[in-house]
């Protein structure tokens, strides 16, 4: 059974503001779901490589260059931000 | 036959012959939606002006051109997790309630370039997390065959829209059955392409190693047409792979080897569903195919457990972007703002904007990836995933295709599973292994339990969409 402290820790890691009621509910639900995963213990996986992508492809990266965007696109993206000022995204201070 | 009942090919012929205009056709769908969607609630947004202006332009083109692409003038609906430029895209969530998409998804660009007409955005479980569309932050969608029941999920709105003839086809997305299961529950066709066959650019990400966009259609032929239009390598999605143009190969049923995995017919399947699916498979046998019982170890419960470890882990990373800073709902906007610092912005925007199922999965993923648990959970799941892929590979060397039920039961009642997350997850028991292996799979209607549709799932090797589409298409002749 996952503890309440663990649930609160996870919520902080995931940056989720949960009410006490939500924490209690999630604690019960997560415990049940985590129990379901016990079936994987019986699967023998020594010497098995993990898979991250089901269809193997050559991984390729593009050049680390800034591709300029048209001003209308930039405008649209800035419009979508909740807090903005003079074309900049406004955030609460970090330091 | 009403205009709203026509297949893509029938519409195409009708438009060329001048039997009706794109405008008439579009108006017919819009009128139907306006009259009947209050009973179904398939749509979150109806893009009436966009559709009518597109239709008028298409009619001009048709009057000038001799040849038009097959999807010209075809009205379709889009799951509200795929971006259509300048149209609201909510992902079924309050956190994106007022988000206006700044660009088109690649699949939308491709369909627009053929002249297909966008009727609106359909309802879904929030961020595609669910199997019933009941987790939409806005309202549930109802199954057109029985409106006390769910249409399935997460692409429930799209499946219901196609089943009610609110559109000629719809786009959905499938991470663990979210196209196939609602298609089965609503009695329509749903295709989940091979992972990488369709670009995910413009698809709001849920689990990046599993998500695929695919068609939900009235017929298998329509699914083939739409799949051809939306598939292909995209420089904007580095996981997309070039697919070969689909030929119309004559797959003979004579001696076709069909594998039926015994693990998909054990405890938990409704005996009526088993009867119908086995008799559907029997029809292929009568036509000359060879049925072989096979074993796919770990392909049901272990696959579901593996999926419910890998997917939430990817979700916890993909949903970190909803932070109240770049877009979407922000607690800083609300009048009763007691936001003191940056952490508050995150905690409160996400706490208020995200629904319970989404939070559950983020928490699960955070746990599976956290120090001390990573090896036992996430890494273990990735290794089991390798075994599942290997098992499918071995099986598909001995047989040509694999056939299973799409779901263990017909559509369940609204409210029946919503309070028990694990019970809800179990409705996707036949979906998970295929998604983990990235294989192409189609669900076609194959019978009914009373008036509730049942789906047959046909699975192929990677990039064998053409084979499974052809074999699925033959079913109507058996």
Image (cartoon, rainbow, N blue to C red):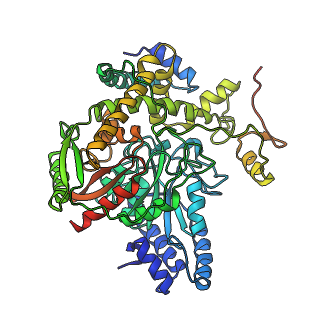
Looking at the image, residue B231 lies above or below residue B304: below
Looking at the image, residue B401 lies above or below residue A83: below
Name which residue lies at 30% across and 59% down.
B471
Q: Is residue B92 visible?
A: yes
- Quadrant in the picture for residue B3: bottom left
Looking at the image, residue B62 lies above or below residue B375: below
- Quadrant in the picture for residue B287: bottom left
Q: Is residue B146 visible?
A: no
Residue B451 x/y as whole percent: 22, 59
Residue B260 x/y as whole percent: 22, 45
Nearer to me, B437 or B363:
B437
Left of B228 or right of it: where is B64? right
Nearer to me, B151 or B408:
B408
Name which residue lies at 59% across and 49% down.
B202
Q: Quadrant of the N terminus of chain B?
A: bottom left
Name which residue lies at 55% across and 80% down.
B67
Q: Quadrant of the C terminus of chain B?
A: bottom left
């Amino acid at each position: 059974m996952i503890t309440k402290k663990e649930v609160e820790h996870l919520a902080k890691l995931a940056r989720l503001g949960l009410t006490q009621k939500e924490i209690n509910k999630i604690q019960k639900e997560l415990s049940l779901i985590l129990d379901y995963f016990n079936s994987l213990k019986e699967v023998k996986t020594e010497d098995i490589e993990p898979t991250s992508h089901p269809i193997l492809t050559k991984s390729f990266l593009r050049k680390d260059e800034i591709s300029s965007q048209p001003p209308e696109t930039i405008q649209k993206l800035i419009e979508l931000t909740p807090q903005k000022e003079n074309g900049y995204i406004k955030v609460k201070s970090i330091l | 036959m009403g205009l709203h009942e026509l297949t893509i090919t029938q519409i195409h012929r009708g438009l060329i012959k001048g039997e009706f205009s794109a405008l008439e056709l579009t108006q017919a769908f819009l009128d139907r939606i306006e009259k009947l969607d209050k009973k179904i609630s398939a749509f979150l947004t109806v893009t009436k002006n966009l559709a009518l202006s597109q239709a008028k332009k298409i009619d001009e083109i048709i009057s000038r051109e001799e040849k038009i692409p097959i999807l010209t003038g075809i009205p379709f609906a889009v799951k509200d997790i795929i971006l259509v430029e300048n149209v609201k895209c909510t992902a079924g969530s309050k956190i994106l309630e007022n988000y206006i998409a700044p660009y088109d998804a690649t699949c939308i660009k491709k369909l627009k370039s053929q002249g297909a007409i966008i009727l609106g955005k359909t309802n879904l479980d929030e961020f595609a997390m669910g199997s019933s569309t009941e987790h939409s932050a806005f309202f549930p969608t109802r199954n057109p065959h029985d409106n006390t029941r769910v249409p399935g999920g997460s692409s429930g709105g799209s499946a219901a829209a196609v089943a009610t003839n609110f559109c000629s086809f719809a786009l959905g997305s499938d991470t663990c059955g979210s196209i196939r299961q609602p298609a089965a529950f609503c009695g329509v066709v749903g295709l989940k392409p091979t992972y990488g066959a369709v670009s995910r650019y413009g698809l709001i990400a849920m689990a990046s190693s599993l998500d695929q966009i695919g068609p939900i259609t009235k017929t298998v032929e329509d699914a083939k047409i739409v799949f051809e239009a939306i598939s292909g390598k995209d420089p904007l999605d580095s996981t997309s792979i070039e697919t070969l143009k689909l030929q119309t190969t004559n797959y003979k049923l004579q001696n076709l080897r069909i594998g039926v995995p015994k693990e998909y017919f054990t405890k938990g399947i409704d005996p009526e569903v088993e009867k119908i699916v086995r008799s559907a498979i029997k029809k292929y046998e009568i036509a000359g195919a060879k049925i072989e019982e096979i074993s796919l170890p770990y392909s049901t419960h272990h696959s579901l457990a593996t999926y419910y470890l890998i997917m939430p882990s990817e979700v916890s990373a993909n949903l970190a972007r909803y932070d109240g800073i770049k877009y979407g709902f922000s607690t800083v906007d609300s009048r009763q703002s007691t936001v003191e610092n940056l952490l508050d912005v995150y905690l409160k925007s996400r706490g208020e904007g995200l629904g319970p199922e989404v939070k559950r999965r983020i928490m699960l993923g955070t746990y599976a990836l956290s120090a001390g648990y990573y090896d036992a959970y996430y890494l273990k799941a990735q290794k089991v995933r390798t075994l599942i892929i290997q098992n499918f590979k071995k099986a598909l060397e001995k047989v040509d295709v694999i056939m299973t039920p799409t779901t263990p039961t017909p559509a369940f009642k609204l409210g029946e599973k919503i309070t028990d997350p694990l019970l809800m997850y179990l409705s996707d028991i036949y979906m998970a292994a295929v998604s983990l292996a990235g294989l192409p799979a189609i669900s076609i209607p194959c019978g009914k339990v009373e008036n509730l549709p049942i789906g047959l799932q046909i699975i192929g090797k990677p990039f064998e969409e053409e084979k499974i589409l052809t074999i699925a298409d033959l079913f109507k002749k058996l």
